[in-house]
Image (cartoon, rainbow, N blue to C red):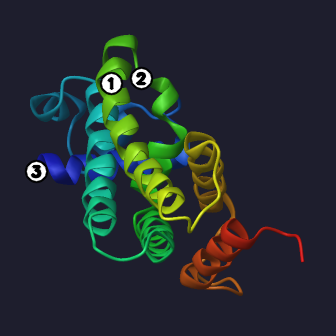
Amino acid sequence: MTREDILDAAAQVIRQKGFHGASMSDIAEVVSLRKASLYHHVSSKQEILLALLERALGMLTEQIAGISSQSIPADEKLRLMIRTYLSALAENSDLSSVLLFEHRSLDKKSHARHIPHRDAFEGLWRDVVNEGARAKIFSCADAGMAVRALMGVMNWTLTWFSPEGGKSIEVIADEYADLFFHGLLK
């Protein structure tokens, strides 16, 4: 049994039951450990939650940073970032759910540790929006607001998206990009 196995199980349990509803016993049961043995690998649910958030943000930041540093126009970059982000959320739904919906359960110390990573991730998006504005590709008075709006739309997708649904995550990503770039007005 590895720490990674425990974190995978914890993400699944926390997604199903919520952070406050999930117990260390629930997590131990999924990985076929006794609760006391689980504490050999992790000290608390807070430690697990922070580790899951760090894992999720690390994965997402690596993927998005790789795109944001490419030498392509900002609109192409942003479209690719949207596709990549939504695909990563859909492919890692347990981990993504914990990141998007359970971060509020962090204690103050863990929250303070998490926020700089979240802000750096959002900064990658703001940088691309600002890059597009400087290049006159985008008209954007407030990149932070634009990024928060886009992130909100994309993050909420996890609550309703189904791989068996009528649209693939890639199609949804492209439709979001089109809506974001062109709006609703004709």
Q: Are marks 3 and 1 in contact (CB under 8 Å)?
A: no
User: Under tag 2, what secondary structure?
Assistant: loop
Q: Position of residue 144 (x, y in %)?
A: 56, 41
Residue drawn at x 88%, y 70% is 185
Query: Which of 42/78 is in front?
Result: 78
Residue sitting at x 62%, y 72%: 177
Q: Amino acid at mark 3?
A: Thr
Q: Which residue is mark 3?
A: 2
Which residue has dot 1 on it? 46
Answer with mark 2 or mark 1, whichever residue precedes in sequence.
Answer: 1
State the image coordinates of residue 159 (x, y, percent, origin top left).
Answer: 65, 57
Can residue 100 be seen by looking at this rendering? yes
| Relative depth, front residue between 77 and 8 | 77
Q: Image check: 26 left or right of 140?
A: left
* Within-10-Å neighbours for mark 1: few <14, some 14–19, many 20+: some
Q: CA distance from mark 2 to mark 3?
A: 23 Å
| Residue at the limit of the structure toward the top, as seen here | 108
From the viewer's perspective, tell me whether residue 166 is left or right of residue 93: right
Pointer 3 local density, CA inside 10 Å: few below 14, some 14–19, many at least 20 = few
Q: Please report the residue visible at 31 percent of the width from the left and 36 percent of the height from the top.
A: 117
Q: Of discs 2 and 1, which sits in the foreground?
A: 2
Identify which amino acid the numbered label 1 is placed on. Gln
Q: Is residue 15 left or right of residue 56?
A: right
Image position, residue 122 (x, y; %): 43, 44
Q: Where 79 falls versus 148 (above or below)?
A: below
Residue 30 is at least partly visible in this image: no
Q: Image height check: is 144 above or below 44?
A: below
How far apart, in angstroms, are the residues tagged by discs 3 and 1?
18 Å
